[in-house]
Amino acid sequence: MAFKKAKAEPMLSKYIKEGDKVDIESIVRAGKDSEKRQYRTMVYDIVSEDQIRIAMPMEQGKVILLPVDAEYNLCFYTKNGLYQCIAKVLERNKNGNVFSLLMELVTDLSKYQRREYYRLNTVLEMKASKVADEVDMLSTEEVEIIDTDITFDNGVMVDISGGGARFISRTQYPVGSEVLFKFKLFVSGKINEYTLHGRVLFSQPLKNNPGAYEHRMQFIRIPKDDRESIIRYIFEEERKIRRREKG
């Protein structure tokens, strides 16, 4: 079922700016077996109040050629929060070394309310370890580590949300594997320590850093208190950033 063309949100350019990050997620229609895919890219140009140009997404160094006329969920990461809409690919373009997509909004731009998926760019030390067979993980929300001799590898977390994190490490964790993820955050005036269970959604070597790997991980069985604490940390850091920008 196609979406009815909607009148664009007035002053689209008031909310979305060039350089804003945007997630593109494929729409799986009822009766279709296609896998839902998600890519991260950025806004290249605001063409009009209902058309936007974005950089073509890339995966493992290769440009992803999204099909013309296909519709996608877009989630924009802006200074004023997250906004979402559904948009259709009108055309694919190449200007020099820049590959872009011209997309037309087919639903209104709306505020995105799922706080746990707002990603904060950061640089934090962390440790990770692949979950081995001898580590007994409970199937409830609470995670209990039975084996105390687990070896953790050092890494750097480069963004975080209430739903997961992206990190760089010298160890590559295969897509689909489960890891233990340890880190600390300064929240509401105190240091909080976290040991969370996650599943690797994306993994690739870094071209500009031989021997290092980028991973995207989704938290699984995360306690509610830990998720809320991470979201609180993100909001506090966002407020600090806005204050510095105004100052």
Image: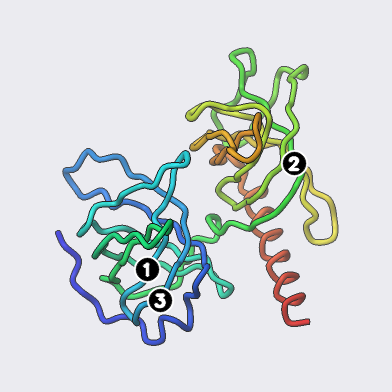
Numbered disc in front, either 2 or 3: 3
Q: Nearer the viewer, residue 76 or 204?
A: 204
Task: Using a 10 Å C-alpha cutoff, classify the residue at mark 3 as few (fewer than 14 neighbours), some (14 to 19) or many (20 or more).
Answer: some
Disc 2 marks which residue? Answer: 183
Q: Are marks 2 and 3 in contact (CB under 8 Å)?
A: no
Is 77 above or below relative to 128? below
**Which mark is drawn over residue 147?**
none
Task: Using a 10 Å C-alpha cutoff, classify the residue at mark 1 as few (fewer than 14 neighbours), some (14 to 19) or many (20 or more).
Answer: many
The picture quadrant where one finds residue 149 is top right
Q: Secondary structure at mark 1?
A: strand
Residue 142 image point, x, y percent: 63, 35
Is 202 above or below relative to 165? above
Amino acid type indicated by mark 3: Ile
Q: Secondary structure at mark 2?
A: strand
* C-alpha separation, residue under disc 3 versus residue under disc 1: 6 Å
Residue at 72% of width from left, 36% of height from top? Answer: 155
Amino acid type indicated by mark 1: Arg
Task: Using a 10 Å C-alpha cutoff, classify the residue at mark 2 as few (fewer than 14 neighbours), some (14 to 19) or many (20 or more).
Answer: some
Q: Are marks 3 and 1 in contact (CB under 8 Å)?
A: yes
Residue at 48% of width from left, 29% of height from top? Answer: 176
Disc 3 marks which residue? Answer: 46
Disc 1 marks which residue? Answer: 53
Residue lying farthest bottom? 10
* C-alpha separation, residue under disc 1 versus residue under disc 2: 37 Å
The picture quadrant where one finds residue 196 is top right
On the rendered structure, is 131 left or right of 89?
Answer: right
Q: Nearer the viewer, residue 114 or 238?
A: 238
